[in-house]
Image: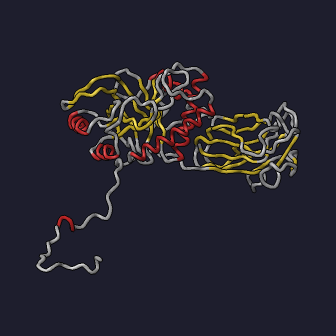
Amino acid sequence: MLASASLGRGATPVPLDPARTAARPASVAPLAAAGPQPGTYTGKGFDTCTAPAQSTMDAWRSSSPYRAVGIYISGASRSCTQANLTATWVTNQTNKGWHLIPIELDYQAPCGTRTPKMSYDPATARSQGATRAASAVNAASALGIPAGSVIYNDIEHYPTSESCKAAVLSYLSGWTERLHALGYLSGMYSSGSSGVRDLCAAYDDPRYTRVDHLFFAWWNGVADTDAGSYCPDGHYANRQRIHQYTGDSYETWGGVRIYIDRDYLDVSAGTTPPQEFSVTVDNTTAGRFTASANWGTSTYSSQRMGPDYRFADPVSASDVAWYKANLPETGAYEVSVWYPAASGYNDSTPYIVATTGGNQSVRVNQRLNGGRWVSLGVFTLAAGDGDKVGVSRWTSGTGYVVADAVRITRA
């Protein structure tokens, strides 16, 4: 029908509206922050419960000393609505020179008063942290906050104890590991006297994966990044700190009043999440496994990895079978082991992990959990090629000690 249509008698063609026919751009630039957040910045910032309106941000940009703003992007424990917090808002602020501090507020310490609470069980808490990291990344992506940004996990003050500390640090380990896998950096916000003290005390603890940035509350009124006794100067020293130095204050700039906490930042966009790395070494991997003649070879169990595995009687002497691996850089790595299980195998097999702080021993009951990867934990291992994990015969346990395979994965 359209092909056969024509103008009727006396009809006058109407000129096309130039505005309607003007060339249109082939594509529209997506809304996004101007690079990873908070980026590189040294100076003052603030955080407030609700992301301020654009007019407020403009007034403060032109008259205040602040150039960074904390925003609560995700979490069930957020207590304020975020009607202003959109991808457009994020794009506008970063284009105008604001640095953003993305914050997640969800699971809290199990011994604290805030809810929801993470589990006291370290394994469950670690899984909860990983789940929340994935949700936080989804929220960040929806706002146009790109990979390479730091997302800070807000864990409010809690009356610390050993069990509570283990839960919090395990939660943050899962949070960090999942963020790294998704291309983001991890941070933690907490009070100096609880979460920060616990985190910094475990800075080199191989059981936990270290967060990348520290955001600490210490209301001493001093605009710097010194954490005093709460965290040593050498920890998070590579432009990885934000200090919330006063809280719960009204402040007015450009005629606009906001209720804020004051922050001082010394951060850098130069830090990037570690790339994924994993290496598996079997007892048959050429040039990667060494053992004395006291270690026999067996194909008895179908739970083995590879064509065979090694075994030896327990003795009260050092005779370690070593696995060699070449690691790309010094850092946190999860060490997992594979062995066949049988009732005649050792119920207290010592695995030796060569950490940067010296050899650490982890005992495993090789009568259980055979034919799968069993994690020994997360350890700080040195870069380069060398013996990283060993199986020792020196044990009071009974039954054959077995050496089959190990896997080392960057945490």
Q: Quadrant of residue 314?
A: top right
Kindly identify the residue that appears in the image at 87 percent across and 35 percent down. 315
Question: Residue 259 or 10: which is nearer the viewer?
Answer: 10
Extreme-top residue of the structure: 159
Q: Is residue 397 above or below residue 389?
A: above
| 158 with respect to 335 (left or right) | left
Q: Quadrant of residue 171?
A: top right
Q: Is residue 180 above or below residue 227?
A: below
Q: Residue 31, image x and y in percent?
A: 34, 51
Q: Residue 370, image x and y in percent?
A: 78, 43
User: Visible in this render: residue 200?
Assistant: no
User: Visible in this render: residue 287?
Assistant: yes
Q: What coloring was used for the rendering?
A: secondary structure
The number of callouts visible is 0
Q: Residue 30, image x and y in percent?
A: 35, 54
Kindly identify the residue that appears in the image at 61 percent across and 33 percent down. 124
Kindly identify the residue that appears in the image at 27 percent across and 28 percent down. 258
Question: Residue 142 or 12: which is nearer the viewer?
Answer: 12
Kindly identify the residue that appears in the image at 38 percent across and 47 percent down. 144
Q: Quadrant of residue 250?
A: top left
- Which quadrant, please, contains the N terminus? bottom left
Q: Is residue 251 above or below residue 385?
A: above
| 310 with respect to 357 (left or right) | right
Q: Residue 320, image x and y in percent?
A: 79, 41
- Which quadrant, please, contains the C terminus? top right
| 119 with respect to 345 (left or right) | left
